[in-house]
Amino acid sequence: MSPPKIYAPNVHLFAYQLRKESGEQKDNLKKLFEQGEKILKQFGINQTIDIQDQPGYRVELAAQQTEDNASIFFEKWSDSPITGIAYPVRIHDTFALALK
């Protein structure tokens, strides 16, 4: 009997980073997204997550966002068979990155 096969696996990663750590004034804007890029490289996706912070309570950070979509689509990045999205956002004092 052959082992069972996975038909359509899904992985969801939600990562968070405080904008400024206590006691430090260093802005952590790029720290979280550099780690996200390292994860994507493990799957053959070699693209930077271009981000741009702006004033506001809830800010969608994708630098190349359109008016109706702030997600970054993986299938546009490489010839990898993996599809999905990256969604960078800042909510108050916390950066968040969703990889789906």
Image: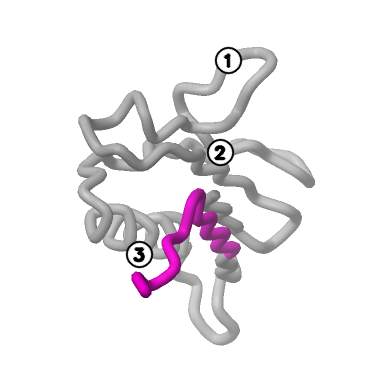
The residue under label 1 is which amino acid type?
A: Thr
Secondary structure of the residue carrying numbered label 2: loop
User: Percent from the top left, x then y, of residue 65?
Assistant: 54, 22
**Mark 2, residue position:** 61
State the separation of the CA atoms marked 2 and 1: 11 Å
- Report the magenta residues as a range: 1-14
Compared with 78, 25 (above or below) is below
Residue 74 x %, y %: 39, 35
Q: Residues within 10 Å of mark 2 (few under 14, many from 20)?
A: many
Q: Residues within 10 Å of mark 3 (few under 14, many from 20)?
A: few
Viewer-side label of 2, 1: 1
- Count of marks placed on residues: 3
Q: CA distance from mark 2 to mark 3?
A: 16 Å
The residue that appears at 23% across and 54% down in the rendered structure is 41
Q: The disc labelled 2 sits on which kind of residue?
A: Leu
Q: Which mark is residue 66?
A: 1
Magenta stretch prevailing secondary structure: loop
Front residue of 55 and 99: 99
Instruction: Identify the residue shown where x is 21% and y is 43%.
Output: 46
Residue of label 3: 35
